[in-house]
């Protein structure tokens, strides 16, 4: 499964909704994520991809869209 599809899977698990936002759609502006849900989303990403995301990287800018998460993970994996 490609990275973006796996990120979407985590997002669907966190929101509890069968959603399919565009890869460049803002997850925060659209209301899919907020500051509270972001921590759950990042934890899900860590578990799904087997990475550790340091607190210094917890920025809405890095996790604002599926494509931004994909780019971030490309540097980590």
Image (cartoon, helix red, strand yellow):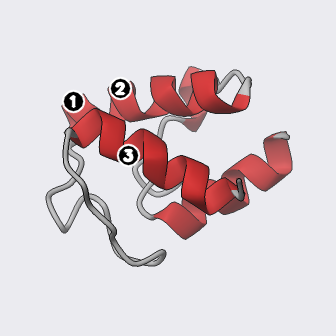
Q: Can you give x and y, in whole percent of width and height, for residue 34 in the image?
A: 20, 44
Q: In this image, 2 relative to 17: left or right?
A: right
| Quadrant position of residue 19 | bottom left
Q: Can you give x and y, in whole percent of width and height, for residue 27 in the image?
A: 30, 61
Question: Quick check: 4 above or below 51?
Answer: below
Circles 2 and 1 in contact, beta carbons < 8 Å: yes
Residue depth check, mark 2 versus mark 1: number of the one nearer the observer: 2
What number is the disc on residue 40? 2
Identify which residue, 55 or 21, lies in the foreground. Answer: 21
What number is the disc on residue 5? none
Q: Give the labeled residue for mark 3.
A: 11
Q: How many marks?
A: 3
Q: In this image, 69 relative to 10: left or right?
A: right
SS assignment at label 2: helix
Circles 1 and 3 in contact, beta carbons < 8 Å: no
Q: Earlier in the sequence, mark 1 or mark 3?
A: 3
Q: What is the C-alpha distance between the residues marked 1 and 3?
A: 13 Å
SS assignment at label 3: helix
Residue drawn 69% across the image and 52% down it? 72
What number is the disc on residue 36? 1
Residue depth check, mark 1 versus mark 3: number of the one nearer the observer: 3
Q: Quadrant of the C terminus?
A: top right
């Amino acid at each position: 499964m490609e990275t973006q599809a796996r990120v979407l899977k985590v997002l669907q698990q966190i929101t509890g909704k069968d959603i399919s936002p565009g890869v460049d759609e803002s997850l925060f502006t659209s209301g899919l994520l907020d500051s509270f849900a972001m921590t759950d989303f990042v934890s899900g990403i860590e578990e799904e991809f087997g990475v550790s995301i340091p607190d210094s990287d917890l920025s809405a800018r890095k996790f604002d869209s599926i494509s931004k998460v994909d780019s971030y993970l490309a540097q980590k994996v």
